Image: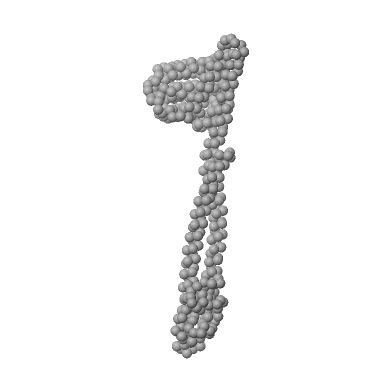
Amino acid sequence: MNKITKKSFYSFLALYLLSSFSFLILAAYWFFTSQVAMEKNGNFYKMNHIADTVSSEVIKAHMSATPFNLPLFANAKVALLDENKKILYGGFNHKIDFSQEYYMRDDSFTLVTQRTAGHLGVKYVVVQSGECVANITILKNKIFYTVIMTGFAVLVIAIFLSYMFLKPLRDKMREIETFVKDATHELNTPITALMMSASRMKSKKTYDENIVQNVSISSKQLYDIYSSLSFLSFDNSSEEARSVRFDEVVAEDVQYFQELLERKKILVVQELQPCEITIAPTKAKMLANNLLSNAIKYSAPNTTIALKTTSDGFVIKDEGIGIARDKLDVIFKRYARANSYAGGFGIGLSIVENIAKEYGFKIEIESQEGEGTTVRIAF
């Protein structure tokens, strides 16, 4: 990952983790407080039930004149005291605060009641239990470990989602990096040719047809690159469509590339019947320009390019290197190239497809490696 992708990755990851952990902590806190409240309420009713049970046994023993035996309770201490707060039965763990009926101290809850109505000389029933505090401690530990495990799972999911959601960005950045490298290479060739031609013209100080031809070809290459990039980068929808003779556009395009055709010794066979379509003039030229430029670029010297226009279509056929069958589905994608034979940005056919989609044209392409490519456009 480059710096921009890394920054986006860590920013997304930090935002996702911050929001997830905040929600997780709030949820854990809400769950803990609600469970503690339920545990305390349950403990209060349980201790009251113990106090009621003991009080009823005291009253029953006194009324029936039978011996009283203090019941034993799991997780609770019970003590019966007289009015002087002297222990008559049982015992307790911690000192009793008789000014409070129900309170927590020293990790245990204490309940003080006077429900025996003085039977058997018992005035106070004291119940002490540490079960609630123990249960709250267990609950706290469970929630803590659950939060830790959930947090780890959230971290793994966050990393996975970050990679998944940022994949389009990484792919686009990779495309841009490749595009910049290709652009540097593509621009370097005509610029170097211009500089060399200019240097030769200065040194010779005379007219040289070959030098002028090099300057012309290089200038047109730069202009084509500029036109393609401008088409992709700026809004061209403002140009109104009008009736255009596409056969004339093709003929002009052949003249435009004549010097390059002569340099590569490529023969162009033209069968141009009148073909009138409704399209923005600039886009008509871009359509013809990109198809002919590709045909020239991927054709070897001493080959033929055939151009044909009808009243409702255009066909261009070359004898170039061709396109592999598995590449035919991707060649119209921006920055996609079937091979590295003649460089390029991989945007020519993307522009052709965009124009065709805009005006409802249908494109068919047939190609065989080593034999050439045929492109048909039905207007």
Q: Quadrant of the N terminus?
A: top right
Side (left or right) of 287 relative to 217? left
In percent of the image, x 53 and y 36: which residue is there?
A: 172
Residue located farthest toward the right when viewing the structure as drawn: 203
In percent of the image, x 56 and y 59: which residue is there?
A: 145
Q: Is residue 374 visible?
A: no
Q: Nearer the viewer, residue 242 or 100?
A: 100
**Image mark count:** 0
Locate residue 362: give its quadrant. top left
Residue 378, given in percent of the width and then of the height, sits at 42, 25
Residue 227, given in percent of the width and then of the height, sits at 48, 24
Q: Nearer the viewer, residue 237 or 374?
A: 237
In percent of the image, x 50 and y 73: which residue is there?
A: 103
In percent of the image, x 47 and y 27: which residue is there?
A: 231
Side (left or right) of 178 relative to 255? right
Q: Is residue 296 above or below residue 4?
A: above
Q: Quadrant of the C terminus?
A: top left
Residue 119, given in percent of the width and then of the height, sits at 46, 86
Residue located farthest toward the top when viewing the structure as drawn: 206
Q: Is residue 119 visible?
A: yes
Residue located farthest toward the front when viewing the structure as drawn: 99
